[in-house]
Amino acid sequence: MPLYSDSHAHLTYDRFDVDRGEVIARARAAGLRYIVTVSSRIGDADACADLAAAHDLIYFTAGVHPHEAKNWGPEVARGIEQALLRPKGVAIGEIGLDYHYNHSPPAAQRAAFREQIVLARALRLPIVVHTRAAWEDTFAILQDEDAKAIGGVFHCFSGGPEQAERCRALGFYLSFAGPITFKNTTALAEAARVTPLDRLLIETDAPYLSPHPLRGQRNEPARVVLVAERLAALKGLAPDAVGAAATRNLESVFRLPRPDDD
């Protein structure tokens, strides 16, 4: 069976409360080896860690999303650090900047982003970056805070070839999600074409961004296969090859244990 992975999902969200077990079972049946469930809300990290503890294929991250950056502080930082001391914590995230919605003031977003990168360096963990309408400030902060030393992932990559190259120059991986399957995504498609197979990840961002032809429905990890199929078409490869490469890359960036049969 093909070995796929979902580098970014939010399985602790209440939209999965009615059938979380079935969602995880469908992911397993679809050939997923790993799901990374991502904490983006303050107070969610322990639930992510609990879910990872209950399922062999699930790992987790802990961090404060830019939408909640106005609530960042020492107590929140301690909570993230404590959560990541638990088994199967693999990264700090999702963190970054979102100037599209500005649910938190930009200055608060920048401060929380910087401090979480500092924490990631102290813990020797990679980061999961969210950036929207904020490319220049995102790159500047990553460079200022020496994020290249720890590396990480640009989740749900949304830029074009220029941004893709700048991400790779920082040593980061690019994770593609449902939007790569949407119409009128010329720049994103070109970014996918030029991204080397050894720097590419796939994700769902479930419950958001369900890929075509399921756009508008609640997303779930099993649908990451549709993302792999679209990337494969863009790169002239078999979907299994994209899925397997993305899984190897996920093992590398998050330092996951590699099965003996790889």
Image (cartoon, helix red, strand yellow):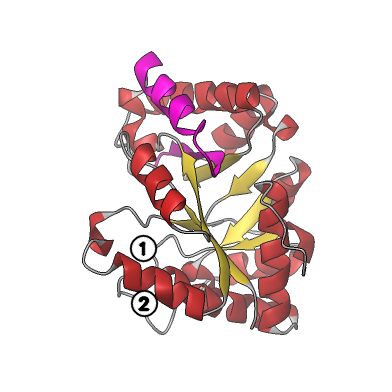
Task: From the viewer's perspective, tell me whether residue 115 is left or right of residue 142.
Answer: left
Q: Position of residue 15 (x, y in %)?
A: 24, 61
SS at circle 2: loop
Residue 111 falls within the magenta-colored stretch: no
Is the residue 219 above or below the residue 148 in the image?
A: below
Tell me: residue 125, above or below residue 73. below
Is residue 235 in view from this perspective? yes
Q: Position of residue 251 (x, y in %)?
A: 69, 55
In the rendered view of the protein, which quadrant contains the C terminus?
bottom right
Location of residue 193 by image quarter = bottom right
The residue carrying mark 2 is 215
Counting from the top left corner in percent of width and height, residue 189 is at 62, 70
Q: Alpha-carbon distance for marks 1 and 2?
A: 9 Å
Q: Which residues are magenta?
A: 73-100
Given contact means CB atoms under 8 Å apart, are the residues at marks 1 and 2 in contact? Answer: no
User: What residue is disc 1 on?
Assistant: 208
Say what amino acid the circle numbered 2 marks. Arg
The numbered disc on residue 115 is: none
Callout 1 secondary element: loop
Task: For residue 211, say whether it is visible.
Answer: no
Q: Which residue is located at x 70 percent, y 26 percent? A: 146
- Residue at 66 percent across and 73 percent down: it is 243
Residue at the image position 36 percent from the left and 17 percent from the top: 75
Crowdedness near tag 1: few (<14), some (14–19) or many (≥20) residues, C-alpha within 10 Å: some
Q: Nearer the viewer, residue 100 or 126?
A: 126
Task: Pick whichever of labels 1 and 2 is earlier in the sequence.
Answer: 1
Q: What residue appears at the point 51 percent right and 65 percent down from the top-left corner?
A: 177
The image quadrant that residue 236 belongs to is bottom right
Q: Say which quarter of the image contains residue 147.
A: top right
**Does 252 sit above or below residue 3?**
above
Q: Is residue 98 magenta?
A: yes
